[in-house]
Image: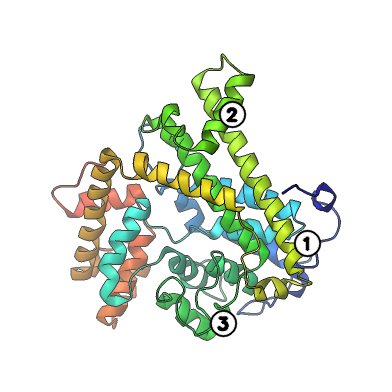
């Protein structure tokens, strides 16, 4: 497929008819006066950036726990890279850039310390009480746990931002109300009783481009970090024909390029090809679906912003490469085992001695909680920890803490 450049947006002019419109938002759970200088989606994005949860991402793992070096991605730098790609896609497709960026910036708020390792451990601990899901935890953070405003808990984001957060990966239930990817997490079910996010439909196109931007960002930058760590080599990248082709291009044009610049040139091309693929496919899908409003996007029976079949296959091959050489590397698995022990030890200790939690809010709200409510309270506390805070908490409470270096 070819991109129709005449149909691209470059940050000026009107939004497309299928874009989310901040001036006709479905509003906020708690009504607020509008801003004289910012759209409602701008306000959402700004509130997200100023949260404690956003700042904590700086010290939360992306892939490498306690890396030996300052140049590896953290959850924060990953989030910023996702937001940059999401905004570029939104601009090209004439969407609301602020909504796309806001969904990208908030999508990882619910991640635990130690990345997916911490999430798996906390999910295991919370299984008797409904389990743990980082997407549902993000919703809890922005609707309950952030305590910044005098009139309400959370951030009081617009319906569209909350919908994008919850449904950016697609509908959560099918036409029969059954979970598409397993049972719908209880925090999402409970919140929808207050503010129905219509979890059986697709999200806005802005949320869809945020979701595909996440794939583009981590597929590219996990390769970059893998090369920096030494777990990946250029020879290993040859396993993926798409990457082999990019390397051949760079070698032909720059035969004497040093390793670092060579890697950067590959990454640049990878992002560009993936972004252009998404734009072309999305334009094609839009021509087929022909949505005349954001509601038509939600009511479509397909994900509109997605990869072509060829790029989707490349995406699978890259993920297989990353799992085989990085995510399941023996050294990474050793560190993951230690991180799992830390999270499980802390959960059990706080359940036995909840007053060991630090901070007035966490201790003052213990009284009267049932076992299940206490477990969720402890889960909220643990999920909010950074890697370094979790390590220090474990060192304070236990005689031996696993070495994550």
Q: Quadrant of residue 167?
A: bottom right
Q: Is residue 186 above or below residue 135?
A: below
State the residue at coordinates (49%, 84%). 177
Residue 347 seen anywhere in this rendered image of the structure:
yes
Mark 2 or mark 1, which is nearer to you?
A: 2
Q: Are marks 3 and 2 in contact (CB under 8 Å)?
A: no
Left or right placement of residue 191 versus residue 303 in this view = left
Please give the residue where the numbered disc 3 appears in the rendered image.
195
Left or right placement of residue 256 versus residue 290 in this view = left
Q: Quadrant of residue 290?
A: bottom right
Please give the residue where the numbered disc 1 appears in the rendered image.
37
State the residue at coordinates (79%, 72%). 292
Q: Are marks 3 and 1 in contact (CB under 8 Å)?
A: no
Q: As rendered, which of 87 and 170 lies closer to the eye?
A: 170
Q: SS of the residue at dot 2?
A: helix
State the residue at coordinates (75%, 51%). 92
């Amino acid at each position: 497929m070819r991109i129709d450049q005449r149909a691209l947006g470059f940050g000026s002019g009107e939004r497309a008819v299928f874009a989310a419109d901040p001036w006709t938002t479905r509003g906020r759970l708690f009504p607020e006066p509008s801003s004289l200088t910012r759209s409602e989606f701008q306000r959402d994005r700004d509130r997200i950036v100023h949260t404690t949860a956003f700042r904590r991402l700086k010290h939360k793992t992306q892939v490498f726990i306690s890396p030996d070096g300052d140049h590896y991605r953290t959850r924060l730098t990953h989030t910023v890279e996702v937001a940059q790609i999401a905004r570029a896609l939104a601009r090209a497709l004439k969407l609301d850039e602020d909504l796309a960026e806001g969904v990208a910036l908030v999508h990882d708020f619910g991640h635990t310390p130690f990345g997916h390792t911490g999430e798996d451990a906390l999910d295991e601990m919370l299984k008797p009480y409904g389990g743990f899901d980082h997407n549902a935890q993000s919703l809890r953070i922005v609707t309950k746990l952030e305590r910044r405003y005098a009139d309400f808990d959370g951030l009081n984001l617009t319906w569209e931002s909350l919908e994008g957060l919850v449904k950016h990966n697609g509908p959560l239930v099918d036409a029969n109300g059954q979970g598409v990817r397993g049972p719908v997490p209880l925090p999402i079910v409970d919140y929808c009783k207050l503010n129905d996010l219509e979890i059986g439909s697709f999200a806005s196109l802005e949320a869809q481009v945020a979701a595909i931007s996440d794939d583009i960002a981590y597929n590219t930058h996990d390769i970059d970090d893998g090369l920096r760590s030494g777990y990946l080599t250029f020879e290993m990248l040859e396993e993926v024909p798409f990457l082999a082709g990019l390397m051949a291009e760079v070698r032909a044009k720059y035969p004497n390029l040093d390793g670092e610049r060579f890697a950067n040139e590959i990454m640049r091309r990878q992002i560009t090809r993936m972004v252009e693929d998404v734009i072309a496919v999305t334009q094609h899908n839009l021509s087929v679906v022909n949505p005349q409003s954001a509601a038509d996007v939600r009511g479509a029976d397909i994900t509109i912003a997605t990869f072509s079949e060829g790029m989707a296959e490349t995406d699978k091959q890259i993920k297989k490469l990353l799992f085989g050489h990085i995510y399941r590397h023996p050294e990474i698995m050793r560190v993951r085992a230690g991180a799992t022990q830390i999270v499980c030890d802390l959960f059990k200790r706080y359940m036995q001695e909840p007053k060991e939690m630090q901070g007035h809010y966490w201790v003052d709200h213990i009284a009267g909680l049932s076992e299940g409510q206490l477990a969720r309270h402890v889960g909220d506390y643990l999920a909010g920890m950074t890697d370094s805070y979790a390590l220090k908490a474990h060192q304070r409470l236990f005689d031996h803490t696993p070495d994550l270096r």
